[in-house]
Image (tube, grey):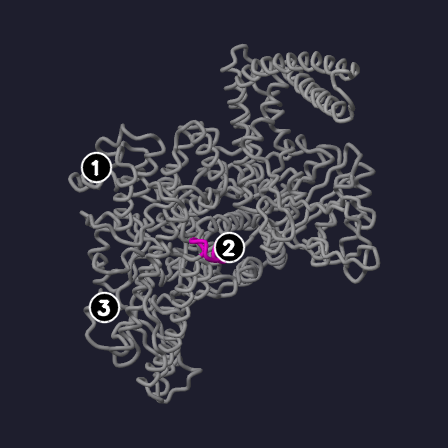
Amino acid sequence: MAIKYGFPFLFQDVDEYIDPVIDNVLEKNVKGTEGRQVIVLGDKEVDYDPNFKLYLNTKLANPKYSPSVFGKAMVINYTVTVKGLEEQLLSVIVGFERKELEEQRERLILETSDNKKLLKELEDSLLRELATSSGNMLDNTELLVTLEETKSKASEVFEKLKLAEKTSADIDKLRDGYRPAAKCGAILFFVLAEMAVVNSMYQYSLASYLDVFDLSLRKSLPDGILPKRLKNIMDTLKHNIYNYGCMGLFERHKLLFSFNMTVKIEQAEGRAPQDELDFFLKGNLSLEKSKHKKPCEWLPDQGWEDIVRLAELFPEQFGSLPDDVEKHLSQWETWYDLEGPEQSPFPMKYRENLTPFQRLLLLRCFRLDRVYRAVTDYVTVTMGEKYVQPPVISFDAIYEQSTPNSPIVFILSPGSDPASDLMKLAERSGFGGNRLKFLAMGQGQEKVALQLLETAMSRGQWLMLQNCHLLVRWLKQLEKSLERITKPHPDYRLWLTTDPIKDFPIGILQKALKVVTEPPNGLKLNMRATYFKISHETLMSCSHPAFRSLVYVLAFFHAVVQERRKYGKIGWNVPYDFNESDFQVCMKVLDTYLTKAHNQGDTEIPWGSLKYLIGEVMYGGRAIDSFDRRILTVYMDEYLGDFIFDVFQPFHLFHNKDVDYKIPPKGLKETYVEEIESLPLANTPEVFGLHPNAEIGYYTQAARDMWTHLIELQPQTGESGGGVSRDEYVSQVAQDIHNKLPKVFDLDVIRKKLGLDASPTAVVLLQELERFNKLVVRMGRSLAELQRALAGEVGMSSELDEVARALFNGHIPAIWRKLAPDTLKSLGNWMLHFNRRYSQYSSWVDEGEPNVMWLSGLHIPESYLTALVQATCRKNGWPLDRSTLYTQVTEFRSEEEVNEKPGQGCFVSGLYLEGADWDMEEGCLVRSKAKVLVVQLPILKVIPIEAHRLSLRNMLRTPVYTTSMRRNAMGVGLVFEADLFTTKHISHWVLQGVWLLLLLLLLLGPLGPLCQVFGLDQDPVVLTACLFCNPTSAT
């Protein structure tokens, strides 16, 4: 219809996919046949009116359309800018504070517009009279009268415009007094809006932001003195936005939000310059080591590189830092070894001469594991303590903020379920019984949901649609239904629950009140929440004397498996969503089995059945990784057994000199609640069986994750420090890498050299070289194309743009990563690893199989080990399917000590041990040293053996993974299992999360003794084996 009759047509909320059906319309492929114009739309010809206009709009903040779309249509960025939003907010503030002033300004704008319009009409009238007059102008009295009238009116209008201009300047001067608050408001909106880059569920509309802005104006304390009033407005606004944002953010992103807010506000006031922020986020990205040699062993290599770069970038504050460290080593080492160096005075002049932000830069060079805590301190000092203490989620407060027109979206995290809390809120608010409707979404529930929505909207009911992420496509239909709502019942509320997913409709998220529900943080809060949901009747229902004690043990176990998740991969290989339903079912299992035993007069508790049903079926049923199931089995053995009721040797769930987690004596529910309330709020990793170092790893990982997200939030244009433009910087890095690329291996020559009877390991070599060649060719081609694109010789494709962005941020480009071994390294450290891989391949080709295989340098290391087993089976005539690998840790500390290959099997290097240390003298696992998370394992001997001959005693089967991400849900990442000798019980190391990895990203703690033990100072892998390697990699 619109095409045929020449009407404008608007497509709203389009995404990045534009249906090809309208391609002809976009390209204006109009055909003229027999005096009429037609256009093909789908399979039909439609009459075309030249007055037809097509508009498409999208809610996507940064849509990625193909170049063809840009060629077919005019693309206009209609996103609000900081300056534009500042003017809007200024009008809101002045309208609230000085209503008469804003009204006067609006009248003035209208009058000025009318006067300019009148002036234009007078000019047009005069020109028309002049154009239509005939004969002598001086004889035309009517024209002369018109000229005189026009002149007098024009003079009058000019006077009004001059007066308006002066009045406008006076009004603007008064309005500018309120500009600081408007500027602060504009910055805060963009801080909030930018969070969508971190997680696509964090969507906020300007309309919802303006509601919070208006609320802040009303709630802020009045004051007759303008500067004080502005301070009150800004303080209230900042805190309200912090609370509003935190309600819809996961716990791990709340400090990131606070820090980004702080930095943006500081930058607006001329503090925390961008070049300082860039160094804090990226460190030293140089691919070359500095010529200034590291003066000590305890300082990590990358830390020294960062110190040198810091001195070069900011000579005024840090120019003498390398020399200061070199000349006063003992002073710096003492500070470095402190438990909390960020809270202690810095050595020498740096304790006084640095701004709070510059202190972060210095700490970054020395102690990465303390950066996360230092950021907390920085926000506290700069903004206040309340900006690092997120508000507690209150369902009553959520209800008060909600409206019938905006749904409430619960963003779920593993282990959380808001349904029971909502039911309690409904009971308190008078919406219990039939006024609260639940529907679990799934296939075939679409029509039912829409019917319930219509009923709830008209009758004023509450409707909760659970697990909306299971029907992503249907959510578009729900979005349209919500947009059609005009006058809903005032009591109506829509509650949605969903996992965080990318495709959730932006329209729903922007208008919704978002609430992130997470299980309580800490053992005490977790157990408190568990017991809060157990009724007194349920706890007293079972007559068996052991029931209440075992429920307490079960609650402790439930809290432990949830809290262990916080420590990342050393906690669980795969994070699991253990939740309240697991606990409730297991409590029912306890009740059933103990009641049966009591009724039958059986004094024995069926421990075997309980351990199997709880550890293997309920909780173990979620664990898809065999090593995670091993942890659950150990917990069952540790927590369930007759020993927990031993009178002579009282059982402790955990105890040390500071705390004692014990089972309270049998009593009423209050007895157990009181015991929980007596527990400390914070707990050490040792409670879960982990080493205290796990907390260091947790903070280090948190700092790296925060840096990764902050880099994504930074502008990708402008200068890159040192006055070099972004394109120049990217070009320099690309040229540097291109110059260092090796030549590809000639596979035909190598095949001839190996001959027809190539061994299985030689076949592995050929496969490795083929993969390496593909990577080298891809790197060379993409770098050459990027150089041409930067020079303007060819177009910049989306692929090349991604390469440029990665090089600028110090990341490995995605197209290289696809052809390289799995890694989490930064670009600089990856290039060192890349060059060492080439050296090993070259040595293997020229000199034969190395005495010690650097396993980390192989693309698929498991293929080499499989070839090793195959070669041994051929030699000894063993069946391949009945052979396996056995490992021994040797006394060789470095590859140089090995002079020949073993008789059977091989020596491998490049393995790193986490969760334990290795005793070279005793040849066994020992407890990790404080602040040392990862140690390099001595040379490992891998021996193929027939499976039936293998008998292991006091040996821990230890998984070997490619990277610190361990394995994914599909099992990718596990290389093999090594055997490590231990004098302690295996369960100790299982709970410690002991494992080996090939590609080390970080090494924590005092590295001096460690580097001496393993000779890391001469090893080219040292840059990849230190704590302070470049943090821009998403570890």
Mark 3 falls on what kind of element? helix
Mark before the other along the chain sequence, 1 or 2: 1
Query: Would you say residue 109 is visible in this rendering?
Result: yes
How busy is the neighbourhood of tag 1: few (under 14 within 10 Å), some, or many (20 plus)? few
Q: CA distance from mark 1 to mark 2?
A: 46 Å
Return the residue at label 1. 320
- When the figure is inspected, residue 939 is found, relative to residue 218, above or below; the finding is below
- When the figure is inspected, residue 442 is found, relative to residue 422, above or below; the finding is below
Let me know if residue 798 is in the magenta part: yes
Q: Residue 665's spot in the image, x, y percent? A: 50, 43
Mark 2 falls on what kind of element? loop
Disc 1 marks which amino acid? Answer: Ser
State the mark number for residue 575. Answer: 2
Q: Residue 243's spot in the image, x, y percent? A: 55, 32
Mark 1 falls on what kind of element? loop
Magenta residues (range): 789-801
Q: CA distance from mark 3 to mark 2?
A: 37 Å
